[in-house]
Image: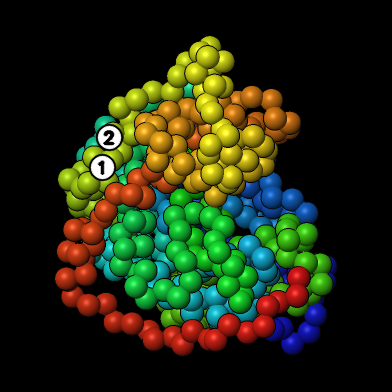
Amino acid sequence: MPAHLFDMQDILATLRDYYRQPAVRERMLEFLGADEAGDFTAEYITADTPALAARTPLLPWELSAQLDAGHDICRSLADRDSLIAHLDIEYVNFDFPADAYLDPARAFALQEPLELAVKRVLGHYGIEALHILSGRGHHFVWRISRASRVFARLAETGRPTLTHDSLMLRRRDGLDAPSITCAFAGLGLLMEFVARLVIELSTPETVIPVEMTAVEVAPSSRGREMLSIDLSEYADPLPMRTIRIPYSGYLKPWQQTHAIGAGNLPRIGPIIFVTLDAADLRHGIAAMRDPKLAAALARESSAIIPDQTNGTEHLLHHYLGSDLQKAHDHFYTARHDDPRRWPETYDHTPLDFLPAGAREALRHPNDLLLRPVGMKNVTNALLDRGWHPRHIAGLIRSKFERDHAWGEEWKDYSPALRADYYTRMFACERTSVHTEAGEIAGAEHTPRLHWPVPRPPEPLEV
């Protein structure tokens, strides 16, 4: 716990002072793909305030002014030269959301089997990712050249959900080349393969549930806590998604005051995204919570997104021969019913005999069906009744595209793409990657850090 209590003005003043360090700004420019001529490969940046997670895109050269204001900086996942791969693992507690911020040592100790499994899977395929620590977990980032053979193969593999809304989003942001949309969709399939391998390898050693996304789990003495492999960016159009820049401040707790608890915020203190290429995990966690240590780490680190095109090609080759790839192929053998037919098809889905979770999610889409657990319940219930998974996605899409008081929910996102992604992911949980995971497990053993996982303390008061 910090030695003293922090208010929001303390946090902003601390970040403004921290951002004056030249090494901090140099690392950020590296992550934006800056060159000596002052150009950037990042399409845009966003700058979050404590009150709001920003969606307004800014030009990358506006970075300096946003740092002077103490903002939380993200960059577009879209890049002019590369396809950026991003794998995110984090600790989630649905009952005590402040837990990871108040007890980071425990949160990261619980993630250790997952972290090591990610490194083992990526290392097996020759991928050396940039490793970043966030407030709740780990990010692994690398890039694939858009001029490469593997980019072309990903574009051939991808099956983007191209509806009118997703096409308009793509055109609005200038990313109108079909190849990048298809390659991003292909990357989403590939990253699902990685995530399933990670779960297969890590589950025997994890002590709390691991899910492909933040799905509510059964409660324990510490609440409904779990580890999430978050691939949610692949459920949305590429132009809409961002990733936080290393050595940026992290203001998410203050943007989620209601969930975190106003009484907990003063105990959290500043949080900084840091890289781990020049630090071990303990040092990284300390630097993440101390701007002076973070600035020192920035002076000896790199935030360049590494080109791992060759390793990604090796990974793609193995995915293309897997049972998971066959399950993905099966998913796309059907199409959603045409929206003009929904009144005579999806609208007649019998709900009375579905399990309660699925039934209520379909009856009250806002917000029960928006939650991953709602989509998972619907997917599993209808798979058990013989539905084709693509038509389950079509049913979910039909709810998303009807008037359920969504407000601005779908302004920047695609209901069809979201429905396809989550339904496919949950439907394919029944597909084994045991053979591929066995090959990785049989390779040279990755040394363990052997962090002790503390006994669960009394539940937090939030």
User: Which residue lies at the image location 60% right of the left edge and 26% below the top edge?
Assistant: 401
The x and y percentages for residue 155 are 30, 34
User: Which residue lies at the image location 45% right of the left edge and 59% below the top edge?
Assistant: 211
Q: Which mark is residue 325?
A: 1
Q: Are marks 2 and 1 in contact (CB under 8 Å)?
A: yes
Q: Secondary structure at mark 1?
A: helix
**Residue 75 position (above or below residue 17):** above
Q: Is residue 136 left or right of residue 132?
A: right
Q: Secondary structure at mark 2?
A: helix
- Dot 1, crowdedness within 10 Å: few (<14), some or many (≥20)? some
Q: Is residue 307 visible?
A: no
Instruction: Check disc 1 and give the amino acid type.
Output: Gln
Q: Which mark is residue 381?
A: none
Quarter of the image with the C terminus in it: bottom right
User: Which residue lies at the image location 64% right of the left edge and 73% below the top edge?
Assistant: 99
Give how far apart the Cα atoms at labels 2 and 1 are.
6 Å
Residue located beneath label 2 in the image: 329
